[in-house]
Amino acid sequence: MAANGSQFEFVSGKPIGSVLIVPLLSVPKPALNMLGQVDQLCEGAVSELLESGAIHADAGPIVHTTRAGAMHRVIVVNMGKAAELTGHKVRVAGAQAARWLMNNQVEKATLWIDDLAATDVEEACGAFASGMTLGGWSYRQFTTRNSTPPALIKVAVCGHEPSAAKQELATMRDAQMVADAANYCRSIAHQPPNVITPKTLAAEAKKLAAEHKLKLTVIDAAKAKQLGMEGLLSVGKGAADPACLIIVEYRPLPKTRTLTALVGKAITFDTGGYSIKPAANMEAMKFDKCGGCTVLGILKAAATLRLSCNLVGVIAAAENAVSAEAYKPADILRMYSGKTVEITNTDAEGRLVLADALWYAQQHLEPTRIIDFATLTGGVIVALGDACAGLMSNHDRLAEELGESGRATHERVWRLPLWDDYVDLIKGTDADLKNSSTKRHAHAIVGGIFLKQFVKSNVPWAHLDIAGVAHDDDGNSITGKGATGFGVRLMVDYLRRYAS
Ligand code: BES
Ligand code: MN
Ligand code: ZN
C-alpha cells in the first residue's frame, strides 16, 4: 500500500500498462471524436465491442476483450443509460473496475475517462475514483494467502483532451482522499476484539492525532469515575480493559466559529452482558465500535483535506463483557448528567455510554451542534433494513441538511420521530429512567428518545443509528462484505456545505 494508504495511484500523462479501462454508457453511444483516440490505443477494440452489440443496457457490468497489441486487455465498464445514471451508479462501476483489477493482479492500467466526463452526473470522475478506492480495499491484516493483489496499482488517467484529463485528476484525487478516510475507518472496524479494546482504540486515536497534529485527550477510567460517568464505566466493568472516553480535536478556525461535535459509540465487543446475545453471528458484534471508527474516519478526512470547519470527536469506548464484575439487570446507575437509570437489559449498553459522552460534549466543549453515530439498535434494521441509517433529531434544519448530504453521497438517512409520546416507554420505576422498554414498540426510536434525555433542548443534535449500514453481511454494497465506513463520505459532504 502507498504511504497514504491508497490502493491506487492516479497519474496523468501517457497511457501505461497493458490494460485499458473504458467506462462507457450503453445509451447513447459515445461520440466518434472520443472513440477515435481510444480505438487507436487498442486497435479498434472499443468500437468493435460497441458494433457487436455487446454493450447494451442489460449487459453485465464488465465487458472484456483481448487484443494482440500493446493494450491487450480492454475492459469496458458498462454504466448503462445516460438518462438513468447517478453518482451512485458511477461509484458502483468504479468499484467493479477496481475488483477486476485486483482479481487479475494488474499493476498498471490506463483509464479512459471521456464518457465519464461527458455525463451530466456532477463530478462523475470523482465518483468513479471513489468507487475504485472503496471497492478495491479489503482487510488483509491477518491473512497469509500467497496470492495477494499488488500493493499499489498505478492508473493513468487519459482522455482525448489531455488538459481536461488533468483537471479531472484533481477531482479524482480529492474523492480518493475521502474514500481513503472511509477505508481507514473500515480498517479499524475490522480489527478483532482481542486486538482492539478501549485502550488500544485510544492508542489508534493517538496515532491519528500525532499524524495530523490533532489534539487528543483521553478520559481514563479513574478520571471518568471522578467525573461521575457511571453509564460509561458500568458498561465496561465486566471487561479486562476498562472503558474510556477519547476526545480528538481538529480546530483550524478561530474559536468564535462554529464547532461540530461528533460523538461515536465504540463498543469494542458487545456480548450483550448478562442479557447475553445468542451465539449465532455474535462475532459481528466486533462491528459495534463502528460509530467510533466513523468519527475517527471523519477527523482523518477533515485533516487530510484541510476542511474549513472546527470539529471535535468524542468516542465512548467500552467492551460489554460478562464477568463477576459486569453490571447487571436491576443495577441503578447515576449518570454523568445526574439522571438515574435502572438497568432492565445489559444489552442496551450503547445508549448508556453515549449518554455520558453527549453530556461531556455539552459540559466541556460547547458545540454548536452534535451529531452522534452508533450501531445502537437491531430495531433500526427491522424498520429500515440496510438501505439507510435511521436519523433522529431535535432540529429540523440539521435533519434536512443531513438528508441532503445523504442523497448526494448515497449514504442515505431516513428520519424517525422523537415525539414525547415515546418517553413513557423508558420511564423508570425505582429510578428516573430505564435503559430499555419492556414492550417491543419502536426500538430504534426508544434508543433515540433515551439519548434525547441527555441533550439540552437548545443544542441542535442528530442521532444516526447506523446498525443496519455500518456493516454489510450480504456483500451488496460498493464496499462488499464487512465494514462499509458509512458516515465518512456523508459527513465530509455535510461539513463542506454546512459547517464552516
Ligand atoms: N449493538 C447492538 C445493536 C445491533 C444489533 C447492532 C444488530 C448491529 C446489529 C445494541 O447494543 C443492542 O444490543 N441493542 C438491543 C437493544 C435492546 C436490548 C433494547 C437491540 O437492538 O436488540
Ligand atoms: Mn447491545
Ligand atoms: Zn451494542
Image (cartoon, rainbow, N blue to C red):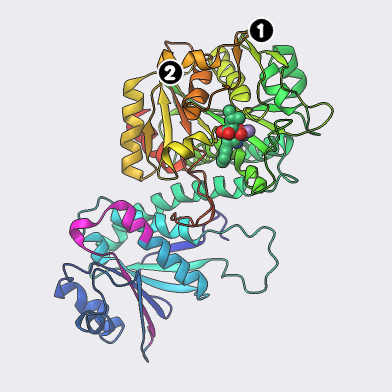
Residue 368, numbered circle: 2
Distance from Cα at disc 2 to Cα at disc 1: 35 Å
Task: Point out the residue furthest to the right here.
Answer: 324
| Residues in magenta, as a range | 70-92
Would residue 346 appear left or right of 400 to someone viewing this image? right
Residue 64, numbered circle: none
Where in the figure is residue 400, as x and y percent of width and height? 31, 28
Image: 431 above or below 155? above
**Image point (73%, 16%), residue name:** 331
Question: Do we see residue 61 in this rendering?
Answer: yes
Q: Quadrant of the N terminus?
A: bottom right
Would residue 227 appear left or right of 180 to someone viewing this image? right
Neighbour class for label 1 at 10 Å: few (<14), some, many (≥20)? few
Q: Quadrant of ligand 3?
A: top right
Where in the figure is residue 204, as x and y percent of width and height? 66, 40
Q: Is residue 158 magenta?
A: no
Q: Nearer the viewer, residue 448 or 164?
A: 448
Image: 145 above or below 410? below
| Amino acid beneath label 1 | Asp
Image: 48 above or below 31? below
Please tell me which of labels 2 and 1 falls first in the chain.
Answer: 2
Neighbour class for label 2 at 10 Å: few (<14), some, many (≥20)? some
Image: 423 above or below 298? above
Q: Quadrant of the C terminus?
A: top left
| Amino acid beneath label 2 | Thr
Would residue 381 appear left or right of 407 to someone viewing this image? right
Q: Badge 1 is on which residue?
A: 430
**Image point (29%, 55%), residue name:** 124
